[in-house]
Amino acid sequence: MYYEVYGEDSGVPLILLHGGGSTIESTFGKVIPILAKSRKVIGVEEQAHGRTSDRNKPIQFNTSADDVAALMDYLKIKQADIFGFSNGASVGMYVAMKFPERVRKLVFASSLTKRSAAPPELWEFIRKSNLSQMPQPLKDAFLKVNPDPDKLKVMHDKDQERMNNFKDINDREIKSIKAETLVISGDRDIAKPEHAVELSKLIPNARLMILPFGHGDYIGEASATQKESRVPEFVIGLIQEFLNGPTLQPR
């Protein structure tokens, strides 16, 4: 399992969990320098993604959560904050549900817990998609760190299988989350903003941030935008306010 460490070793570390079909750099490359100015940051690559090897099992959110907990054990991290984007946010949520004592604060950015949170067209597109339709910036990012086209196809196909088999997360499990959570969504994101509102009400200690952007452009994610912008710096400032602020009592 590949990981990278940045920044100062002080306080609660922050673990970054990238989106599907991505690497550390393609999801968080624009914002890691900002985050690492004030804390220890650990970027992780999921099974079959980037420089992490595959195994003869499907990629699943819950098993990836086990991998994150195992990495925390290996690095002797008792508790961390987690910032997950897209599929990485779903992995982060599973970490918070399965290992509640290990997650202090959770940033759940641009993901969903129900199939109904996204339009039917999205699921149909995923079902019919193939490697040729994968965003070129994500293919380039993978091949930059792992120049094996066969492994790129393995990652694509396993990510596709995971989403084709996506199952709703039970509301009861979501309500069990103890970590203070910041739910983030763009107003033109993959999931409907209404879903983010619903999650912010289900999670006992949650805050909500709806941004006037699409899926990932607010953090400079590689497939969302190629242009230079000050928006990621602004948004990360708000996320840091949440992570560095006092822990609130559940509603």
Image: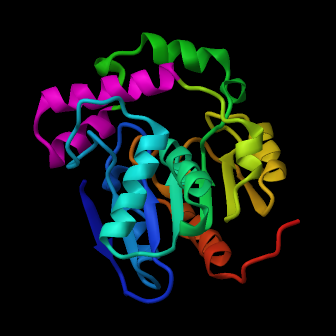
Residue at x-position 41% and y-position 40% = 223
Pinpoint residue 76: horizontal percent, then vertical percent.
36, 76
Q: Main secondary structure of the magenta part?
A: helix
Pinpoint residue 66: horizontal percent, then vertical percent.
42, 51
The furthest residue to the left: 147
Residue at x-position 54% and y-position 12% = 124
Whether 208 is drawn above or below 72: the answer is above
Question: Is residue 18 visible to us here?
Answer: no
Pinpoint residue 250: horizontal percent, then vertical percent.
83, 68
Query: For this view, does 128 lie left or right of residue 245?
Result: left
Residue at x-position 24% and y-position 27% = 154
Which is nearer the eye, 34 or 250?
250
Q: Is residue 146 magenta?
A: yes
Write the start and end of the magenta stretch as one range. 136-165
Residue at x-position 30% and y-position 72% = 5
Quarter occupied by the C terminus: bottom right
Q: Is residue 176 magenta?
A: no
Whether 148 is drawn above or below 24: the answer is above
Pinpoint residue 50: horizontal percent, then vertical percent.
24, 46
